[in-house]
Image (spheres, helix red, strand yellow):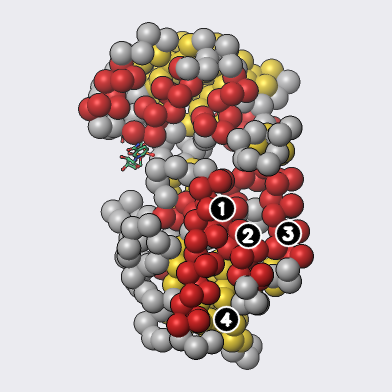
Amino acid sequence: MSEEIEKVKCLIIGSGPAGYTAAIYAARANMSPVLYQGMQPGGQLTTTNEVENFPGYPDGVTGPEMMIQLQAQAERFNTDIRDGWVTKVDFSGDVHKVWVNETKEIHADTIIISTGASAKYLGLDSEQHYLKAGGGVSACAICDGFFYRGQETVIVGAGDSACEEAHYLSNICKKVTMLVRRDEFRASKIMAERVKKTPNIEILYNTDTVEVLGENDLVTGVKVKNNKTGEEKVIPCTGFFVAIGHTPNTEIFKDYINLDEAGYIKYAEPGTAKTNVPGVFVSGDAADKTYRQAITAAGTGCMAALEAERYLAAKGH
Ligand code: NDP
């Protein structure tokens, strides 16, 4: 039997920097926010080691540590932070309905979606091993490239993200090898051209990743295979970057919220946190395929909470 329906003023779905920042602002505005953490409490940052580019941490901070601090800050103002996974929504009426763990039903005046996006990985055992060990596999060059300054890195992918990240790495690393699985890029011409013209980026076309190699949990190279000739070789490197796209975590909203062709939530008005459903706002990577930074997620979390507050005020709450 399902539990009694709970009514809340502000429901925040997701617990990355976007969700926690929205919670801090909403709680301080007396909106008594309830935040569901989802399957990966703390979000993508919990898979990052050192965060050195979030203002306010002159000595850097680890991703998990920063998320613990953001959670503590949200709790300090009495955000109700809960374990739980939102499995279904119904945004068809004035009341926004949400179901948690299939059973618990919540009716919320405002919703802030902060469900983020998940980086795609190749799925190789060796890739996952060094990712979990923090030993040289990353899905974010802007976050982690600095740790490989002066070293050799490999990046897989051929879209705009891969090109942007390869170029970013080329300014930091001695050499960047780019693995492109077909004989052409997917990226826009201008981005691909920029990569092709960069002297310390070597592009290997028709090339698949066979295995990430390492010693003592640290990456030492990548075994690759030319999928036309079958030739295999090892590329020495200390960092292996995966830039094959992200999946925004927006599937449960698709019947009500306008998404773009890649699944990212579309803002109803540029420069706001509004979705097409009044009272439902979005922050963070669920709507951002361009920046994807903790600081931009936090910024849009603030925007979403301020707009939720104004929405409630306009309704006389
Ligand atoms: P995309 O989906 O555009 O590209 C993914 C790339 O990864 C493709 O080249 C694809 O290869 C490759 N890939 C996928 N799976 C594998 C695999 N298993 N092994 C090897 N390669 C693989 O993702 P992006 O993140 O690059 O871009 C997403 C969206 O964001 C795009 O619309 C892009 O234009 C936009 N964007 C814009 C930017 C900007 O304008 N500054 C910056 C970054 C992103 P294949 O081509 O063979 O399918």
For the residues labelled 3 and 2, say whether their Cβ atoms are less than 8 Å apart.
Answer: yes
Residue in the picture at 52% in, 31% down:
142
Q: Earlier in the sequence, mark 3 or mark 4?
A: 4
Nearest to N terminus: mark 1 or mark 3: 3
Q: Is residue 317 above or below residue 114?
A: below
Question: Any atom of ligand 1 within 8 Å of the CB at mark 3?
Answer: no
Q: Do residues under tags 1 and 2 come within 8 Å of each other at their CB atoms?
A: yes
The CA distance from mark 1 to mark 3 is 13 Å
Q: Which residue is mark 1?
A: 298
Counting residues from the start of the chain, the first of labels 4 and 2 encountered is: 4
Left/right placement of residue 181 relative to residue 39 reads: left
Question: Few, some or many C-alpha atoms within 10 Å of disc 4 (few <14, some 14-19, many ≥20)?
Answer: some
Report the amino acid beneath label 2: Tyr
**Could you give the CA–CA distance between mark 1 and mark 2, rounded to whole angstroms?**
8 Å
N-terminal of the two: label 3 or label 2?
2
- The circle drawn on residue 73 is 3
